Amino acid sequence: MELRFSCCCPHNVLPKVFILRNCREYIIDERRLLMANIEEKKTKAQTRENNTGIYRNHKDGVAYKLFSGKKESLSLYNSIMKTEYANPDELQVVTLNSAIYIGRKNDNAIILHFNMLLTEFQTTFNPNMPLRTLIYVANEYEKYIAEHELNLYSEYIQEIPTPHFVTLYYGSKEQPEKQILKLSNAYKCKDENPELELMVTQYNVNPSYNEELKRRCPELDGYIKYVEKTRKYHRQGMTYEEAVKKSVDECIEEGILKEFFIKNKAEVISMTIFEYDEEEHMRLEREEQYRKGEEAGEVRGEKRGIEIGEKKGRIFGAIGILKDLGMSESEIKNQIRTKYKLNKDEIEKYFKEYTKQ
């Protein structure tokens, strides 16, 4: 897209700041239109829900819907835990309606033979999964203790299920095939042997990653194939809604989660579109935060020079994005200090100015 400006300056040359500001205003307007479009889609989706009752809870993700049954949950459990259990009735689904998951709900919690497996599906890498999981599993144990009437003041040990924590990542950004996220990484005071540790194993389940894991769970394999089809058609130029509908129809034709898609077709389409709109909205909000950081830096920078202002704007924008990604203040300061070669006093000064905005 070409932007043209006219001016009475010699040789029709505009000051750099004037061009940047006009370009930025144009881009801001485009972003606002896009965000308004997303909000309009959400409103329409809500209207469809009210009129048809098809999509009862937009916070439920497609993966949550797929693995809400005992049969599918057992398949996922066997795949992750490398077991061969055959009776779904032995399994207990204990997924919580937790406020921890503010966005869509894509978690799965099951207990089988005194093993508790907590699994969450993620399209965005989140280094705070151990902390979130700590809160989640505490709620699980509280519920378990009440249901089984365990006496915490007994002189005998009250046995509880052994926990296992897994994240299945299928986002578009590159991640290793497997990594361990530790709660101790979030501790401000590092300890070689922390007294409280919690580890979440993250598996990348995108195409060509952890194929054996997916092979052992046909439902997981089919879901990832569906996601990849949708991404492929969207990259080819289809609207996201067109890509979703084509992918669902194609999966049915090819026998990929055929029964699931036939039974839940309208609901899956609505869920998938809503999930995408939610992710796009979050991305635009992060960009908006970055833009505000740039503007704040530029306004202050005009008093001391455009170069200083631009640097401050970039730093403020980076702080905003890293905060959105869930990083702790110490982690953000370390990253900003390294990237912009700042000393301790300088980074503290930037943080104070940022918080005053």
Image (cartoon, helix red, strand yellow):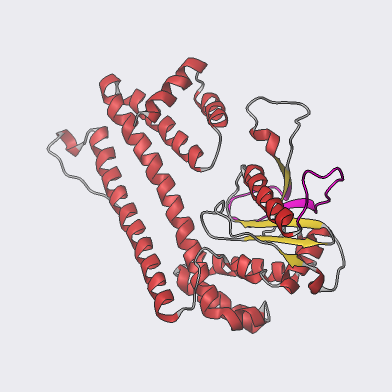
Which residue is nearer to you in this view: 175 or 62? Answer: 62
Q: Position of residue 10 (x, y in %)?
A: 15, 33
What count of labels does the image hold? 0
Q: Position of residue 254 (x, y in %)?
A: 66, 81
Q: Determine if residue 238 is in view.
A: no
In the picture, measured across the screen, residue 196 lies left or right of residue 158, that is: left
Q: Which image quarter holds the N terminus?
A: bottom left
Q: Dividing the picture into quarters, in which one does residue 44 lie?
A: bottom left
Above or below 86: residue 82: above
Above or below 137: residue 264: below
Which residue is nearer to you in this view: 29 or 264? Answer: 264
Q: Which image quarter holds the C terminus?
A: top left
Is 152 within the magenta? yes
Which residue is nearer to you in this view: 197 or 83? Answer: 197
Q: Position of residue 123 (x, y in %)?
A: 59, 55
Q: Read off the magenta span.
A: 149-178
Q: Residue furthest left?
A: 8
Q: Residue at x 52, y 68 (%)?
A: 272
Q: Determine if residue 246 is in view.
A: yes
Q: Residue at x 49, y 62 (%)?
A: 276
Q: Position of residue 271 (x, y in %)?
A: 51, 69
Q: Dividing the picture into quarters, in which one does residue 300 lie?
A: top left
Is 352 within the magenta? no
Q: Residue at x 83, y 74 (%)?
A: 87
Above or below 78: residue 348: above
In the picture, measured across the screen, residue 148 lies left or right of residue 261, that is: right
Above or below 211: residue 219: below
Q: Dividing the picture into quarters, in which one does residue 79 lie?
A: bottom right
- Which secondary structure type mostly characterizes the magenta part of the structure? loop
